[in-house]
Image: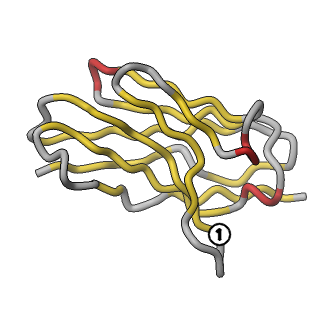
């Protein structure tokens, strides 16, 4: 049906920047919403940022002003620009896609590790 693939994770020092990319492919008519979530060891998965087809964005309070989500509709791709990274941003980052015609389903990527050293 739909495949979701993330890339761009890695190791960075505190204060540094990283950009994550996520591409959705398969039998997609259009993208409803794509977003980034993260899960740290021993923690629950949490929303980081989401962007809808109309361009509406929403961010977790912890990343507001530091992270920016954007998209390339033509390529069914979403990006997460992460600046001023902190050690507490360390987590596995997952991309999630809600697409037409599978609007009742939610598709996840395999995750990409982001590690911020102090």
The x, y position of residue 7, in whole percent, is 46, 46
The residue where tag 1 is placed is: 40
* Residue in the foreground of this view, choosing between 108 and 104: 104
Q: Callout 1: helix, strand or loop?
A: loop
On screen, 26 above or below 116?
A: above
State the colouring used for the structure image. secondary structure
Q: Quadrant of residue 66?
A: top right
At x 42%, y 48%, the residue is 6
Residue found farthest to the right: 118
At x 68%, y 37%, the residue is 82
At x 9%, y 40%, the residue is 27
* Residue in the foreground of this view, choosing between 87 and 29: 29
The x, y position of residue 115, in whole percent, is 71, 59
At x 73%, y 42%, the residue is 63
Is 31 situated left or right of 37 in this image?
A: left
Residue found farthest to the bottom: 42
The x, y position of residue 101, in whole percent, is 10, 40
Q: Quadrant of residue 11?
A: bottom right
The x, y position of residue 15, in whole percent, is 87, 41
On screen, 118 above or below 69?
A: below
Is 115 situated left or right of 73 in this image?
A: right
Is 28 situated left or right of 77 in this image?
A: left
Query: How many other residues sit within 10 Å of disc 1, few (<14), some (14-19) or many (≥20)?
Result: some
Count of residue discs: 1
């Amino acid at each position: 049906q739909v495949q979701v693939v993330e890339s761009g994770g890695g190791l960075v020092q505190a204060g540094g920047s990283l950009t994550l990319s996520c591409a959705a492919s398969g039998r997609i008519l259009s993208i409803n919403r794509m977003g980034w979530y993260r899960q740290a060891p021993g923690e629950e998965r949490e929303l980081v940022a989401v962007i809808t087809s109309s361009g509406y964005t929403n961010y977790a309070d912890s990343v507001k002003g530091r992270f920016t989500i954007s998209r390339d509709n033509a390529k069914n791709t979403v990006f997460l620009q992460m600046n001023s990274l902190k050690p507490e941003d360390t987590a596995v980052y997952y991309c999630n896609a809600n697409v037409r015609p599978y609007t009742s389903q939610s598709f996840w990527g395999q995750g990409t590790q982001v590690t911020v050293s102090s």
